[in-house]
């Protein structure tokens, strides 16, 4: 190993160590990029329809988003508050029902353990611990605020930031870098738009289905199901537990009906709606998505789980264009050009 190779290896190790120390800063920055792309999608659509410059369009989009958020919050928050209080009241009843189900299945150990939890005196300390963790969330709130501010700045002038990235790229690769940034933005924007529409469809259909079945906490359960749509593979399964548990407090038959409803909606979203919405962007393999969520969740916790899939979307585009097209395909071409020479030597 020569000195140049050794220095390159040491440089890569140093960069990796610095990235590890700054992982939370990089997480905030990437979250800002995701939010910035989410803002850029409606900005691009509005500018195609109206003769507005980017700052005016950004202000218009932010105003519409804030007004819609306030209107939706005004409509849903009172009902969600009532259903949240009802959920705290139903938790002991759900635990009692689970205990009875365990007893029916002759799972005595589990029955006794659940029964020991099925009192408010046992549930309340757990809630206090959760509130204690939430009380220390000031740092997370600050990170979210910084993320939003960075996202607004990125959406205000994305071309300048793109030129900055291209400027630090070697001259022979700058044209390729511009194409790569454009393709990453298109893929990420398409994924965000598709998943948002899918989450809204899941929320509305679940709300309607639970309301027709007269399941308590229909709005709260539907909102959880819609939000967890952004966490494929694991999210929809976890989201199903809440409406099924609530329905179980009414009757096992109602719980079975809710389970069937969620299975139908979940499979329709996974195998019909999402592939149609994401047909023009990247299609993530479930194994890749799950491994990304596990890895980033282990390293960064819940923020890592939430940002795992957008990161995989970008990495998939980067790998397909750099690793496959620029490296692997050229190796294959080199091998094919050498093959005739080898055959000629063999003929001699």
Image (tube, rainbow, N blue to C red):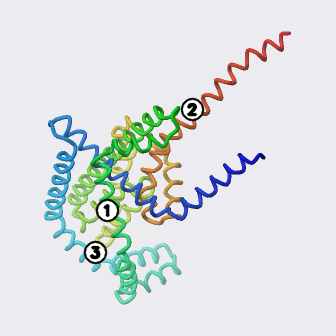
Q: Nearer the viewer, mark 2 or mark 1?
A: 2
Residues at badges 3 and 1 in contact (C-beta under 8 Å)?
Answer: no
Between marks 3 and 2, how big is the CA–CA gap? 55 Å
Give the percent coordinates (x, y) of residue 126.
40, 83
Residue 224: which numbered mark, if any? 1
Pointer 2 residue: 326
Residue 127: which numbered mark, if any? none
Is residue 87 visible from the viewing direction of this image? Answer: yes
- Circle 3: element type: helix
Name which residue lies at 36% across and 90% down. Answer: 121
> Which callout, 2 or 1, points at the residue further toward the start of the chain?
1
- Circle 1: element type: helix
The local crowd at label 3, few if under 14, some if 14 to 19, many if 20 or more residues have their Cα within 10 Å, is: some
Q: Is residue 59 left or right of residue 174?
A: left
Pointer 3 residue: 87
The local crowd at label 2, few if under 14, some if 14 to 19, many if 20 or more residues have their Cα within 10 Å, is: few
Name which residue lies at 15% across and 36% down. Answer: 51
Q: Is residue 281 left or right of residue 65?
A: right
Name which residue lies at 28% across and 43% down. Answer: 41
> Which callout, 3 or 1, points at the residue further toward the start of the chain?
3
Q: Is residue 99 left or right of residue 142?
A: right
> Which callout, 3 or 2, points at the residue further toward the start of the chain?
3
């Amino acid at each position: 190993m020569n000195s140049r190779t050794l220095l390159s290896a040491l440089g890569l190790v140093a960069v990796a160590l610095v990235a590890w120390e700054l992982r939370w800063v990089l997480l905030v920055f990437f979250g800002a990029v995701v939010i910035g792309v989410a803002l850029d999608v409606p900005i691009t659509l509005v500018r195609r329809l109206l003769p507005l410059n980017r700052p005016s369009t950004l202000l218009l989009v932010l105003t519409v988003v804030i007004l819609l958020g306030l209107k939706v919050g005004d409509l849903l928050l009172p009902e969600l508050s009532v259903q949240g209080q009802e959920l705290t009241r139903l938790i002991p009843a759900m635990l009692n029902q689970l205990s009875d189900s365990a007893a029916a299945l002759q799972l005595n150990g589990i029955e006794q353990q659940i029964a020991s939890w099925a009192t408010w005196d046992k549930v309340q300390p757990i809630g206090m611990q959760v509130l204690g963790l939430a009380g220390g969330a000031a740092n997370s709130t600050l990170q979210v605020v910084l993320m939003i501010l960075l996202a607004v700045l990125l959406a205000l002038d994305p071309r300048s930031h793109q030129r900055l990235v291209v400027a630090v790229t070697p001259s022979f690769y700058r044209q390729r870098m511009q194409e790569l940034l454009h393709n990453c933005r298109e893929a990420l924007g398409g994924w965000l738009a598709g998943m948002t529409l899918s989450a809204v469809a899941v929320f509305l259909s679940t709300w309607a289905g639970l309301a027709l079945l007269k399941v308590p906490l229909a709005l709260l359960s539907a909102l959880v199901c819609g939000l967890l749509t952004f966490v494929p593979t694991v999210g929809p399964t976890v989201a199903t537990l809440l409406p099924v548990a609530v329905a179980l407090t009414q009757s096992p038959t109602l719980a079975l009906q809710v389970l069937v409803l969620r299975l139908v909606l979940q499979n329709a979203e996974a195998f019909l709606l999402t592939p149609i919405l994401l047909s023009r962007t990247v299609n993530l393999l479930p194994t890749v998505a799950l491994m990304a969520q596990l890895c980033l969740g282990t390293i960064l916790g819940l923020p890592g789980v939430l940002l795992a899939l957008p990161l995989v979307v970008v990495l998939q585009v980067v790998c397909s264009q750099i690793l496959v097209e620029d490296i692997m395909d050229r190796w294959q071409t080199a091998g094919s050009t050498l093959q005739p020479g080898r055959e000629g030597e063999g003929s001699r």
